[in-house]
Amino acid sequence: MKDNFSLQSKEYASFRPQYPKAFYDFIFEHIKNFDRTLDVATGNGQVAAILATKFREVHAIDISEKQLAQAPQLPNIFYKKERAEHTSFGDKYFDLITVAQAIHWLEFDSFYKEINRILKDDGLFVAVGYRLIEV
């Protein structure tokens, strides 16, 4: 994945659309455990910040240090510069994994293999875009 957002990271954080509360409520209704979540390609951390209101631990990864520098610093969010396709997390570690408006930048085969490795068997994977959402 190429870093396409470091140059305009401050502007990106200011102008990126927010997702509605109903979207998060829908996701939270389908989660069994609120222990650990991963926000992939977190960018400025806008999704991670909302997840932090429900989850004990939020891990948020991105390849752009400048994007991560724009993210909200909350005590239960742990940011890391890391590729989505090859993470340092243990097997079956997360209850929820999200990727918001970034899945098209990832190497699909490697990414899905990694998701299957680190997502708990009863966990939920959510890919989000700005177009019509399919569930």
Image (tube, rainbow, N blue to C red):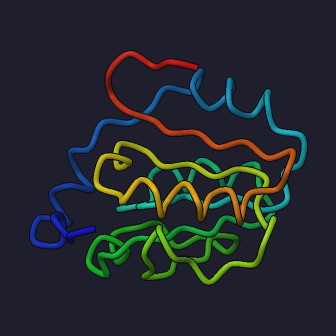
Residue beneath the point at 76% across and 49% down: 54
Q: Is residue 19 left or right of residue 118?
A: left
* Image coordinates for residue 92, horizontal then vertical, percent: 81, 65
Residue beneath the point at 61% across and 77% down: 78
Residue beneath the point at 64% across and 50% down: 51
Q: Is residue 90 above or below residue 99?
A: below
Q: Is residue 20 left or right of residue 3?
A: right
Q: Is residue 52 left or right of residue 42?
A: right
Instruction: Tell me where residue 52 sits by quadrant.
Output: bottom right
Q: Is residue 69 above or below residue 35?
A: below
* Image coordinates for residue 9, horizontal then vertical, percent: 20, 66
* Image coordinates for residue 73, horizontal then vertical, percent: 52, 73
Question: Image quadrant for the N terminus?
Answer: bottom left
Instruction: Tell me where residue 6 sits by quadrant.
Output: bottom left
Name, please, the residue furthest toward the front: 109
Q: Is residue 52 above or below residue 66?
A: above
Q: Nearer the viewer, residue 65 or 76?
A: 65
Question: Image quadrant for the C terminus?
Answer: top right
Residue beneath the point at 47% across and 64% down: 110
